[in-house]
Amino acid sequence: MDALINQLPTGLAIGAVLLLAALGLNFTFGQMGVINMAHGELIMIGAYTAYVLHAWIGLNPAYSLLIALPVAFTITGTLGWLLELSVIRHFYGRPLDTLLLTFGIGMILQQGARDTFGAPNVDVPAPAWLTGGITLTGGIRIHYSRLFILALAIACVIAIAYHLNRSRHGRQMRAVIHNRDLAAISGINTRKVDATTFFIGSGLAGIAGVALTLIGPTGPTLGTNYIVDAFLVVVVGGLGQLRGTVLAAFTLGILNATVEAWADASLAKLIVFAAIIAFLQARPQGLFTVKTRALT
Amino acid sequence: MNTPTPHLSVRGLSAGYGRARVLFDIDLTIEPGTIACVMGRNGVGKTTLLNTITGLITPTTGTITHNGTDITHLAPHHRTRRGIAYAPQGHDTFAPLTVAENLHVTHQATRRGGPELIDAALARFPRLQPLLHRKAALLSGGQAQQLAIARALVTNPSLLVLDEPTEGIQPNIVAEIEAAITDTAAQGITILLVEQYLDVALRLADTVTVIDAGRIIHTGPRTELTHESAHALMAI
Protein backbone atom coordinates (compact mmCIF):
# COMPACT_ATOMS: atom_id res chain seq x y z
CA MET A 1 0.00 0.00 0.00
CA ASP A 2 2.86 2.35 0.86
CA ALA A 3 4.41 1.63 -2.50
CA LEU A 4 1.16 2.57 -4.19
CA ILE A 5 0.87 5.87 -2.31
CA ASN A 6 4.50 6.70 -3.00
CA GLN A 7 4.06 6.04 -6.68
CA LEU A 8 0.72 7.80 -6.96
CA PRO A 9 2.10 11.18 -8.14
CA THR A 10 4.33 9.50 -10.75
CA GLY A 11 1.44 7.30 -11.80
CA LEU A 12 -0.87 10.27 -12.21
CA ALA A 13 1.77 12.04 -14.28
CA ILE A 14 2.22 9.01 -16.56
CA GLY A 15 -1.55 8.66 -16.70
CA ALA A 16 -1.95 12.27 -17.77
CA VAL A 17 0.49 11.78 -20.66
CA LEU A 18 -1.31 8.58 -21.69
CA LEU A 19 -4.62 10.38 -21.44
CA LEU A 20 -3.49 13.25 -23.68
CA ALA A 21 -2.17 10.79 -26.25
CA ALA A 22 -5.39 8.75 -26.09
CA LEU A 23 -7.95 11.58 -26.12
CA GLY A 24 -7.55 12.16 -29.84
CA LEU A 25 -7.82 8.44 -30.52
CA ASN A 26 -11.00 8.41 -28.47
CA PHE A 27 -12.48 10.44 -31.34
CA THR A 28 -10.95 8.84 -34.42
CA PHE A 29 -10.69 5.24 -33.18
CA GLY A 30 -13.14 5.11 -30.28
CA GLN A 31 -15.94 7.02 -31.94
CA MET A 32 -15.36 6.50 -35.66
CA GLY A 33 -13.62 3.11 -35.53
CA VAL A 34 -10.76 4.26 -37.76
CA ILE A 35 -7.43 2.67 -36.89
CA ASN A 36 -5.21 5.62 -37.68
CA MET A 37 -1.64 4.43 -37.20
CA ALA A 38 -0.43 7.89 -38.23
CA HIS A 39 -1.92 9.32 -35.04
CA GLY A 40 1.47 8.90 -33.36
CA GLU A 41 3.07 10.97 -36.10
CA LEU A 42 0.47 13.68 -35.55
CA ILE A 43 1.66 13.73 -31.92
CA MET A 44 5.22 14.02 -33.23
CA ILE A 45 4.25 16.92 -35.50
CA GLY A 46 2.64 18.64 -32.53
CA ALA A 47 5.93 18.36 -30.65
CA TYR A 48 7.90 19.73 -33.58
CA THR A 49 5.44 22.62 -33.82
CA ALA A 50 6.54 23.66 -30.32
CA TYR A 51 10.16 23.27 -31.46
CA VAL A 52 9.68 25.39 -34.60
CA LEU A 53 7.94 28.18 -32.70
CA HIS A 54 10.84 28.34 -30.26
CA ALA A 55 13.93 27.52 -32.35
CA TRP A 56 13.01 28.79 -35.82
CA ILE A 57 10.57 31.60 -35.18
CA GLY A 58 12.33 32.52 -31.95
CA LEU A 59 9.37 32.98 -29.66
CA ASN A 60 10.24 33.62 -26.01
CA PRO A 61 10.15 30.27 -24.12
CA ALA A 62 8.13 32.02 -21.42
CA TYR A 63 5.04 31.94 -23.62
CA SER A 64 5.91 29.92 -26.74
CA LEU A 65 4.51 26.79 -25.08
CA LEU A 66 1.12 28.41 -24.58
CA ILE A 67 1.08 29.63 -28.17
CA ALA A 68 2.20 26.21 -29.41
CA LEU A 69 -0.93 24.53 -27.99
CA PRO A 70 -3.51 26.17 -30.27
CA VAL A 71 -1.10 26.31 -33.21
CA ALA A 72 -0.31 22.58 -32.95
CA PHE A 73 -4.03 21.81 -32.56
CA THR A 74 -4.76 23.67 -35.79
CA ILE A 75 -1.83 22.20 -37.75
CA THR A 76 -2.33 18.55 -36.79
CA GLY A 77 -6.10 18.98 -36.95
CA THR A 78 -5.81 20.25 -40.52
CA LEU A 79 -3.42 17.43 -41.43
CA GLY A 80 -5.84 14.87 -39.98
CA TRP A 81 -8.71 16.52 -41.80
CA LEU A 82 -6.81 16.32 -45.10
CA LEU A 83 -5.90 12.69 -44.35
CA GLU A 84 -9.56 11.82 -43.78
CA LEU A 85 -10.65 13.71 -46.88
CA SER A 86 -8.01 12.31 -49.24
CA VAL A 87 -7.44 8.77 -47.99
CA ILE A 88 -9.30 7.42 -44.98
CA ARG A 89 -12.79 8.37 -46.26
CA HIS A 90 -12.39 5.94 -49.16
CA PHE A 91 -11.60 3.04 -46.83
CA TYR A 92 -14.43 3.16 -44.28
CA GLY A 93 -15.46 -0.36 -43.35
CA ARG A 94 -12.04 -1.72 -44.37
CA PRO A 95 -10.08 -1.59 -41.11
CA LEU A 96 -7.10 -3.66 -42.27
CA ASP A 97 -6.56 -1.52 -45.36
CA THR A 98 -6.91 1.62 -43.26
CA LEU A 99 -4.35 0.29 -40.79
CA LEU A 100 -1.78 -0.46 -43.50
CA LEU A 101 -2.40 2.80 -45.34
CA THR A 102 -2.11 5.00 -42.28
CA PHE A 103 0.95 3.03 -41.15
CA GLY A 104 2.57 3.93 -44.48
CA ILE A 105 1.53 7.55 -44.13
CA GLY A 106 3.04 7.53 -40.64
CA MET A 107 6.33 6.30 -42.15
CA ILE A 108 6.26 9.10 -44.73
CA LEU A 109 5.62 11.68 -42.01
CA GLN A 110 8.47 10.26 -39.90
CA GLN A 111 10.87 10.47 -42.83
CA GLY A 112 9.60 13.96 -43.58
CA ALA A 113 10.48 14.98 -40.02
CA ARG A 114 13.92 13.35 -40.36
CA ASP A 115 14.58 15.26 -43.59
CA THR A 116 13.37 18.53 -42.12
CA PHE A 117 14.76 18.45 -38.60
CA GLY A 118 17.49 15.79 -38.82
CA ALA A 119 17.54 12.37 -37.18
CA PRO A 120 18.94 13.44 -33.77
CA ASN A 121 16.49 14.46 -31.09
CA VAL A 122 15.94 18.14 -30.43
CA ASP A 123 15.04 19.85 -27.18
CA VAL A 124 12.37 22.39 -26.50
CA PRO A 125 13.26 24.32 -23.34
CA ALA A 126 10.48 24.44 -20.79
CA PRO A 127 9.40 27.92 -19.73
CA ALA A 128 11.04 29.20 -16.54
CA TRP A 129 7.73 29.12 -14.71
CA LEU A 130 7.56 25.35 -15.15
CA THR A 131 11.05 24.54 -13.84
CA GLY A 132 11.30 23.19 -10.35
CA GLY A 133 8.60 21.47 -8.43
CA ILE A 134 7.11 20.76 -5.08
CA THR A 135 8.33 18.17 -2.58
CA LEU A 136 5.68 16.12 -0.84
CA THR A 137 6.02 14.42 2.52
CA GLY A 138 8.06 11.27 2.05
CA GLY A 139 10.51 13.05 -0.21
CA ILE A 140 8.54 12.61 -3.42
CA ARG A 141 9.20 15.47 -5.78
CA ILE A 142 6.65 16.49 -8.39
CA HIS A 143 7.84 18.69 -11.24
CA TYR A 144 5.71 21.63 -12.18
CA SER A 145 5.87 20.43 -15.78
CA ARG A 146 4.14 17.19 -14.72
CA LEU A 147 1.47 19.15 -12.88
CA PHE A 148 1.02 21.31 -15.97
CA ILE A 149 0.46 18.19 -18.10
CA LEU A 150 -2.05 16.88 -15.55
CA ALA A 151 -3.90 20.22 -15.60
CA LEU A 152 -3.79 20.30 -19.41
CA ALA A 153 -5.20 16.76 -19.61
CA ILE A 154 -8.00 17.66 -17.20
CA ALA A 155 -8.76 20.85 -19.14
CA CYS A 156 -8.92 18.87 -22.39
CA VAL A 157 -11.29 16.30 -20.85
CA ILE A 158 -13.60 19.05 -19.60
CA ALA A 159 -13.55 20.78 -22.98
CA ILE A 160 -14.29 17.50 -24.79
CA ALA A 161 -17.10 16.55 -22.40
CA TYR A 162 -18.61 19.99 -22.90
CA HIS A 163 -18.26 19.70 -26.66
CA LEU A 164 -19.82 16.23 -26.84
CA ASN A 165 -22.78 17.01 -24.63
CA ARG A 166 -23.52 20.65 -25.23
CA SER A 167 -22.43 21.63 -28.72
CA ARG A 168 -24.29 21.10 -31.92
CA HIS A 169 -21.41 19.23 -33.54
CA GLY A 170 -21.01 17.06 -30.43
CA ARG A 171 -24.62 15.92 -30.60
CA GLN A 172 -24.41 15.36 -34.35
CA MET A 173 -21.21 13.39 -33.86
CA ARG A 174 -22.80 11.09 -31.29
CA ALA A 175 -25.79 10.66 -33.61
CA VAL A 176 -23.64 9.77 -36.63
CA ILE A 177 -21.55 7.34 -34.61
CA HIS A 178 -24.58 5.56 -33.24
CA ASN A 179 -26.41 5.21 -36.55
CA ARG A 180 -25.07 6.74 -39.74
CA ASP A 181 -28.19 6.11 -41.85
CA LEU A 182 -30.55 7.42 -39.20
CA ALA A 183 -28.35 10.52 -38.88
CA ALA A 184 -28.46 11.08 -42.64
CA ILE A 185 -32.25 10.88 -42.77
CA SER A 186 -32.35 13.25 -39.79
CA GLY A 187 -30.83 15.90 -42.03
CA ILE A 188 -27.26 15.55 -40.77
CA ASN A 189 -24.47 15.88 -43.35
CA THR A 190 -22.58 12.82 -42.13
CA ARG A 191 -19.49 13.44 -44.30
CA LYS A 192 -19.05 16.89 -42.83
CA VAL A 193 -19.45 15.52 -39.30
CA ASP A 194 -16.82 12.83 -40.02
CA ALA A 195 -14.39 15.47 -41.25
CA THR A 196 -14.91 17.67 -38.19
CA THR A 197 -14.58 14.70 -35.83
CA PHE A 198 -11.30 13.79 -37.47
CA PHE A 199 -10.12 17.39 -37.25
CA ILE A 200 -10.73 17.48 -33.49
CA GLY A 201 -9.22 14.03 -32.84
CA SER A 202 -6.11 14.87 -34.83
CA GLY A 203 -5.86 18.31 -33.26
CA LEU A 204 -5.80 16.70 -29.81
CA ALA A 205 -2.78 14.67 -30.98
CA GLY A 206 -1.03 17.99 -31.60
CA ILE A 207 -1.77 19.14 -28.05
CA ALA A 208 -0.40 15.85 -26.70
CA GLY A 209 2.75 16.42 -28.77
CA VAL A 210 3.33 19.87 -27.32
CA ALA A 211 2.89 18.44 -23.81
CA LEU A 212 5.42 15.69 -24.52
CA THR A 213 8.14 18.27 -25.21
CA LEU A 214 8.00 19.04 -21.47
CA ILE A 215 9.03 15.57 -20.36
CA GLY A 216 11.58 14.48 -22.94
CA PRO A 217 13.41 15.16 -26.18
CA THR A 218 11.56 15.41 -29.48
CA GLY A 219 12.47 13.09 -32.33
CA PRO A 220 10.89 11.67 -35.51
CA THR A 221 9.84 8.47 -33.69
CA LEU A 222 8.34 10.25 -30.68
CA GLY A 223 4.81 9.21 -31.58
CA THR A 224 5.56 5.52 -32.01
CA ASN A 225 6.57 5.35 -28.33
CA TYR A 226 3.05 6.30 -27.29
CA ILE A 227 0.76 4.98 -29.99
CA VAL A 228 0.36 1.41 -28.70
CA ASP A 229 -0.29 2.56 -25.13
CA ALA A 230 -2.77 5.13 -26.40
CA PHE A 231 -4.72 2.50 -28.34
CA LEU A 232 -4.70 0.27 -25.25
CA VAL A 233 -6.14 3.06 -23.13
CA VAL A 234 -9.04 3.55 -25.57
CA VAL A 235 -9.74 -0.20 -25.77
CA VAL A 236 -9.56 -0.77 -22.00
CA GLY A 237 -11.75 2.28 -21.37
CA GLY A 238 -14.48 1.02 -23.70
CA LEU A 239 -14.59 2.35 -27.25
CA GLY A 240 -15.64 5.97 -27.46
CA GLN A 241 -16.33 6.26 -23.73
CA LEU A 242 -14.69 9.43 -22.45
CA ARG A 243 -14.88 8.54 -18.75
CA GLY A 244 -13.55 5.08 -19.60
CA THR A 245 -10.58 6.61 -21.38
CA VAL A 246 -9.87 8.85 -18.37
CA LEU A 247 -10.14 6.00 -15.87
CA ALA A 248 -8.10 3.61 -18.04
CA ALA A 249 -5.32 6.17 -18.58
CA PHE A 250 -4.85 6.88 -14.88
CA THR A 251 -5.22 3.20 -13.89
CA LEU A 252 -2.59 2.15 -16.41
CA GLY A 253 -0.37 5.07 -15.37
CA ILE A 254 -0.53 4.18 -11.69
CA LEU A 255 -0.15 0.46 -12.41
CA ASN A 256 2.90 1.21 -14.54
CA ALA A 257 4.49 3.40 -11.86
CA THR A 258 3.78 0.93 -9.05
CA VAL A 259 5.14 -2.08 -10.91
CA GLU A 260 8.15 -0.10 -12.10
CA ALA A 261 8.99 0.69 -8.47
CA TRP A 262 10.09 -2.91 -7.89
CA ALA A 263 10.71 -4.28 -11.37
CA ASP A 264 12.70 -2.87 -14.28
CA ALA A 265 10.92 -0.99 -17.04
CA SER A 266 10.70 -3.88 -19.53
CA LEU A 267 9.38 -6.31 -16.93
CA ALA A 268 6.91 -3.67 -15.74
CA LYS A 269 5.64 -3.25 -19.31
CA LEU A 270 5.25 -7.02 -19.60
CA ILE A 271 3.28 -7.20 -16.37
CA VAL A 272 1.01 -4.31 -17.39
CA PHE A 273 0.35 -5.86 -20.80
CA ALA A 274 -0.45 -9.21 -19.14
CA ALA A 275 -2.85 -7.45 -16.79
CA ILE A 276 -4.56 -5.76 -19.75
CA ILE A 277 -4.91 -9.06 -21.61
CA ALA A 278 -6.41 -10.69 -18.49
CA PHE A 279 -8.78 -7.75 -18.06
CA LEU A 280 -9.94 -7.83 -21.68
CA GLN A 281 -10.51 -11.58 -21.49
CA ALA A 282 -12.91 -10.97 -18.62
CA ARG A 283 -14.41 -7.78 -20.02
CA PRO A 284 -13.82 -7.44 -23.78
CA GLN A 285 -16.11 -4.43 -24.04
CA GLY A 286 -13.83 -2.38 -21.76
CA LEU A 287 -14.65 -0.50 -18.57
CA PHE A 288 -17.73 1.32 -19.86
CA THR A 289 -20.33 0.62 -22.53
CA VAL A 290 -23.55 2.25 -23.68
CA LYS A 291 -26.45 0.89 -21.61
CA THR A 292 -29.45 -0.35 -23.56
CA ARG A 293 -32.52 -2.42 -22.86
CA ALA A 294 -31.50 -4.81 -25.59
CA LEU A 295 -30.23 -8.21 -24.52
CA THR A 296 -27.13 -8.11 -26.69
CA MET B 1 -56.74 20.60 -68.51
CA ASN B 2 -54.42 21.38 -65.65
CA THR B 3 -53.21 18.27 -63.85
CA PRO B 4 -51.91 19.01 -60.35
CA THR B 5 -48.29 17.93 -59.70
CA PRO B 6 -48.21 14.76 -57.61
CA HIS B 7 -46.44 15.14 -54.27
CA LEU B 8 -44.19 12.16 -54.94
CA SER B 9 -43.75 10.34 -58.18
CA VAL B 10 -41.71 7.19 -58.67
CA ARG B 11 -41.13 6.02 -62.26
CA GLY B 12 -39.58 2.77 -63.46
CA LEU B 13 -37.68 2.30 -60.23
CA SER B 14 -35.40 -0.70 -59.76
CA ALA B 15 -33.14 -1.11 -56.78
CA GLY B 16 -31.28 -3.68 -54.72
CA TYR B 17 -28.28 -4.47 -52.61
CA GLY B 18 -25.13 -5.28 -54.56
CA ARG B 19 -26.07 -7.91 -57.13
CA ALA B 20 -29.29 -8.86 -55.37
CA ARG B 21 -32.13 -7.02 -57.09
CA VAL B 22 -35.11 -6.36 -54.86
CA LEU B 23 -37.38 -3.93 -56.71
CA PHE B 24 -38.36 -4.13 -60.36
CA ASP B 25 -39.87 -1.30 -62.40
CA ILE B 26 -41.90 0.32 -59.63
CA ASP B 27 -44.34 3.11 -60.54
CA LEU B 28 -45.97 4.96 -57.66
CA THR B 29 -47.75 8.30 -57.49
CA ILE B 30 -48.82 9.96 -54.26
CA GLU B 31 -51.15 12.94 -54.35
CA PRO B 32 -50.65 15.80 -51.89
CA GLY B 33 -52.28 15.38 -48.49
CA THR B 34 -53.15 11.72 -48.90
CA ILE B 35 -52.14 8.63 -46.98
CA ALA B 36 -50.60 6.07 -49.30
CA CYS B 37 -50.22 2.63 -47.82
CA VAL B 38 -47.78 0.09 -49.21
CA MET B 39 -48.50 -3.49 -48.20
CA GLY B 40 -47.05 -6.90 -48.83
CA ARG B 41 -45.57 -9.89 -47.09
CA ASN B 42 -42.15 -9.90 -45.42
CA GLY B 43 -39.21 -9.58 -47.74
CA VAL B 44 -41.07 -8.34 -50.83
CA GLY B 45 -39.18 -5.04 -50.95
CA LYS B 46 -41.34 -2.58 -49.00
CA THR B 47 -38.51 -1.27 -46.84
CA THR B 48 -36.17 -1.17 -49.85
CA LEU B 49 -38.71 1.05 -51.61
CA LEU B 50 -38.80 3.45 -48.64
CA ASN B 51 -35.00 3.41 -48.34
CA THR B 52 -34.73 4.31 -52.03
CA ILE B 53 -37.26 7.13 -51.75
CA THR B 54 -35.46 8.59 -48.71
CA GLY B 55 -32.04 8.25 -50.33
CA LEU B 56 -30.41 5.54 -48.23
CA ILE B 57 -30.22 3.33 -51.35
CA THR B 58 -29.38 4.56 -54.84
CA PRO B 59 -31.69 3.04 -57.46
CA THR B 60 -30.20 1.17 -60.42
CA THR B 61 -32.78 2.64 -62.80
CA GLY B 62 -35.75 4.96 -62.59
CA THR B 63 -36.51 8.40 -61.22
CA ILE B 64 -37.99 9.85 -58.05
CA THR B 65 -39.69 13.24 -58.23
CA HIS B 66 -40.70 15.26 -55.17
CA ASN B 67 -42.95 18.29 -55.73
CA GLY B 68 -41.87 18.33 -59.37
CA THR B 69 -38.12 18.20 -58.66
CA ASP B 70 -36.01 15.18 -59.59
CA ILE B 71 -34.41 13.97 -56.34
CA THR B 72 -33.17 10.59 -57.60
CA HIS B 73 -29.53 11.41 -56.85
CA LEU B 74 -29.98 13.75 -53.90
CA ALA B 75 -28.16 12.79 -50.67
CA PRO B 76 -30.49 11.64 -47.85
CA HIS B 77 -29.83 14.67 -45.64
CA HIS B 78 -30.77 17.00 -48.48
CA ARG B 79 -34.02 15.09 -48.98
CA THR B 80 -34.85 15.49 -45.29
CA ARG B 81 -34.04 19.18 -45.51
CA ARG B 82 -36.47 19.57 -48.39
CA GLY B 83 -39.29 17.95 -46.41
CA ILE B 84 -39.08 14.17 -46.67
CA ALA B 85 -39.04 12.77 -43.13
CA TYR B 86 -38.51 9.09 -42.44
CA ALA B 87 -39.22 6.99 -39.36
CA PRO B 88 -37.53 3.68 -40.26
CA GLN B 89 -38.54 0.21 -39.17
CA GLY B 90 -37.74 -1.07 -35.70
CA HIS B 91 -38.41 2.19 -33.80
CA ASP B 92 -34.91 3.40 -34.51
CA THR B 93 -33.63 6.24 -32.36
CA PHE B 94 -30.23 7.59 -31.36
CA ALA B 95 -29.85 5.29 -28.34
CA PRO B 96 -26.98 7.10 -26.55
CA LEU B 97 -28.77 10.46 -26.82
CA THR B 98 -31.56 11.60 -24.53
CA VAL B 99 -35.09 12.01 -25.84
CA ALA B 100 -34.61 15.79 -25.93
CA GLU B 101 -31.27 15.44 -27.75
CA ASN B 102 -32.86 13.10 -30.30
CA LEU B 103 -35.38 15.80 -31.15
CA HIS B 104 -32.93 18.71 -31.03
CA VAL B 105 -30.24 17.12 -33.17
CA THR B 106 -32.78 16.43 -35.91
CA HIS B 107 -34.50 19.80 -35.57
CA GLN B 108 -31.22 21.71 -35.77
CA ALA B 109 -29.86 19.69 -38.67
CA THR B 110 -32.93 20.13 -40.85
CA ARG B 111 -33.56 23.82 -40.09
CA ARG B 112 -37.15 23.82 -41.31
CA GLY B 113 -38.74 25.84 -38.54
CA GLY B 114 -38.49 27.23 -35.04
CA PRO B 115 -38.61 25.56 -31.62
CA GLU B 116 -42.42 25.41 -31.84
CA LEU B 117 -41.93 22.26 -33.95
CA ILE B 118 -40.47 20.47 -30.92
CA ASP B 119 -43.31 21.67 -28.70
CA ALA B 120 -45.83 20.47 -31.27
CA ALA B 121 -44.20 17.04 -31.55
CA LEU B 122 -44.21 16.67 -27.75
CA ALA B 123 -47.83 17.78 -27.60
CA ARG B 124 -48.58 15.04 -30.12
CA PHE B 125 -46.84 12.43 -27.96
CA PRO B 126 -47.34 13.57 -24.34
CA ARG B 127 -45.82 10.32 -23.04
CA LEU B 128 -42.42 11.64 -24.12
CA GLN B 129 -42.67 14.81 -22.04
CA PRO B 130 -41.62 13.28 -18.69
CA LEU B 131 -38.90 11.23 -20.43
CA LEU B 132 -37.04 14.16 -22.05
CA HIS B 133 -33.82 13.58 -20.12
CA ARG B 134 -33.86 9.81 -20.37
CA LYS B 135 -31.48 8.09 -22.79
CA ALA B 136 -33.39 6.74 -25.79
CA ALA B 137 -31.69 3.37 -25.17
CA LEU B 138 -33.79 2.99 -22.02
CA LEU B 139 -37.19 3.59 -23.65
CA SER B 140 -39.72 0.81 -24.16
CA GLY B 141 -40.60 -0.21 -27.71
CA GLY B 142 -43.76 1.90 -27.73
CA GLN B 143 -42.02 4.96 -26.32
CA ALA B 144 -39.17 4.57 -28.80
CA GLN B 145 -41.62 4.36 -31.70
CA GLN B 146 -43.32 7.54 -30.54
CA LEU B 147 -39.92 9.21 -30.32
CA ALA B 148 -39.08 7.95 -33.82
CA ILE B 149 -42.21 9.58 -35.24
CA ALA B 150 -41.72 12.73 -33.14
CA ARG B 151 -38.16 12.91 -34.47
CA ALA B 152 -39.54 12.84 -38.00
CA LEU B 153 -42.19 15.47 -37.20
CA VAL B 154 -39.72 18.06 -35.87
CA THR B 155 -38.33 18.31 -39.41
CA ASN B 156 -41.62 19.97 -40.41
CA PRO B 157 -42.11 17.50 -43.26
CA SER B 158 -44.29 17.77 -46.32
CA LEU B 159 -43.98 14.00 -46.77
CA LEU B 160 -43.83 11.65 -43.79
CA VAL B 161 -42.51 8.17 -44.54
CA LEU B 162 -43.33 5.55 -41.90
CA ASP B 163 -42.10 1.96 -41.96
CA GLU B 164 -44.31 -0.34 -39.89
CA PRO B 165 -44.93 2.13 -37.07
CA THR B 166 -47.14 -0.31 -35.17
CA GLU B 167 -44.95 -3.41 -35.39
CA GLY B 168 -44.51 -5.07 -31.99
CA ILE B 169 -46.20 -2.22 -30.12
CA GLN B 170 -48.75 -2.70 -27.35
CA PRO B 171 -52.38 -2.06 -28.47
CA ASN B 172 -53.09 1.16 -26.54
CA ILE B 173 -49.98 2.80 -27.99
CA VAL B 174 -50.90 1.53 -31.47
CA ALA B 175 -54.11 3.54 -31.08
CA GLU B 176 -52.13 6.65 -30.12
CA ILE B 177 -49.81 6.23 -33.11
CA GLU B 178 -52.79 5.74 -35.40
CA ALA B 179 -54.35 8.93 -34.06
CA ALA B 180 -51.07 10.78 -34.61
CA ILE B 181 -50.97 9.62 -38.23
CA THR B 182 -54.57 10.73 -38.82
CA ASP B 183 -53.92 14.13 -37.22
CA THR B 184 -50.72 14.61 -39.21
CA ALA B 185 -52.57 13.86 -42.45
CA ALA B 186 -55.31 16.29 -41.40
CA GLN B 187 -52.67 19.03 -41.31
CA GLY B 188 -52.08 18.45 -45.01
CA ILE B 189 -48.90 16.38 -44.65
CA THR B 190 -48.65 13.61 -47.21
CA ILE B 191 -47.97 10.20 -45.69
CA LEU B 192 -46.34 7.13 -47.16
CA LEU B 193 -46.98 4.23 -44.83
CA VAL B 194 -45.79 0.65 -44.85
CA GLU B 195 -48.12 -1.33 -42.63
CA GLN B 196 -48.46 -5.05 -42.00
CA TYR B 197 -51.67 -4.94 -39.98
CA LEU B 198 -54.49 -5.05 -42.50
CA ASP B 199 -56.99 -3.44 -40.11
CA VAL B 200 -54.79 -0.44 -39.38
CA ALA B 201 -53.87 -0.04 -43.05
CA LEU B 202 -57.44 -0.15 -44.27
CA ARG B 203 -58.58 2.34 -41.59
CA LEU B 204 -55.87 4.88 -42.47
CA ALA B 205 -55.18 4.57 -46.18
CA ASP B 206 -56.51 6.69 -49.03
CA THR B 207 -54.70 4.54 -51.58
CA VAL B 208 -53.32 1.03 -51.24
CA THR B 209 -50.40 -0.43 -53.16
CA VAL B 210 -49.54 -4.10 -52.78
CA ILE B 211 -46.05 -5.36 -53.61
CA ASP B 212 -45.08 -8.95 -54.17
CA ALA B 213 -41.59 -10.20 -55.06
CA GLY B 214 -40.43 -6.66 -55.84
CA ARG B 215 -43.25 -5.79 -58.24
CA ILE B 216 -46.49 -3.88 -57.76
CA ILE B 217 -49.41 -6.28 -58.08
CA HIS B 218 -52.16 -3.89 -57.11
CA THR B 219 -52.59 -0.18 -56.75
CA GLY B 220 -55.75 1.87 -56.37
CA PRO B 221 -58.00 3.80 -54.00
CA ARG B 222 -58.78 2.22 -50.65
CA THR B 223 -62.45 2.21 -51.58
CA GLU B 224 -61.79 -0.39 -54.28
CA LEU B 225 -60.76 -2.92 -51.65
CA THR B 226 -62.80 -4.91 -49.23
CA HIS B 227 -61.26 -6.61 -46.24
CA GLU B 228 -61.52 -9.92 -48.09
CA SER B 229 -60.05 -8.75 -51.38
CA ALA B 230 -57.15 -7.10 -49.53
CA HIS B 231 -56.56 -10.30 -47.62
CA ALA B 232 -56.55 -12.25 -50.86
CA LEU B 233 -53.96 -9.90 -52.38
CA MET B 234 -51.70 -10.21 -49.36
CA ALA B 235 -51.85 -13.99 -49.41
CA ILE B 236 -50.52 -14.35 -52.95
Image: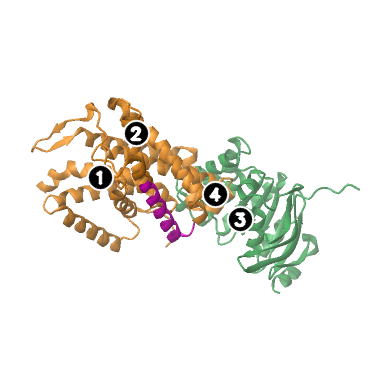
Chain colours: A orange, B green
Q: Is residue A29 left or right of residue B121?
A: left
Q: Chain of mark 1?
A: A
Q: Which residue is mark 2?
A: A52
- The dominant secondary structure in magenta is helix
Mark 3–mark 4 Cα distance, whole angstroms, equals 11 Å
Which residue appears at 76% of the width and 70% of the height? B229
Which residue appears at 22% of the width and 37% of the height? A146
Q: Nearer the viewer, residue A28 or B103?
A: A28
Q: Nearer the viewer, residue A239 or B97?
A: A239
Mark 2–mark 4 Cα distance, whole angstroms, equals 41 Å
Q: Which residue is mark 4?
A: A183
Q: Which residue is mark 3?
A: B56
Q: Is residue B169 left or right of residue B73?
A: left
Within-10-Å neighbours for mark 2: few <14, some 14–19, many 20+: some
Q: Secondary structure at mark 2?
A: helix
Q: Which residue is mark 1?
A: A15
| Mark 3 touches mark 1? (CB < 8 Å) | no
State which region is magenta: A92-111
Q: Earlier in the sequence, mark 4 or mark 1?
A: 1
Mark 1–mark 2 Cα distance, whole angstroms, equals 27 Å
Q: Earlier in the sequence, mark 1 or mark 2?
A: 1
Which residue appears at 42% of the width and 36% of the height? A74
Which residue appears at 33% of the width and 49% of the height? A244
| Mark 3 touches mark 2? (CB < 8 Å) | no
Residue B58 shows in the view: yes
Within-10-Å neighbours for mark 3: few <14, some 14–19, many 20+: some
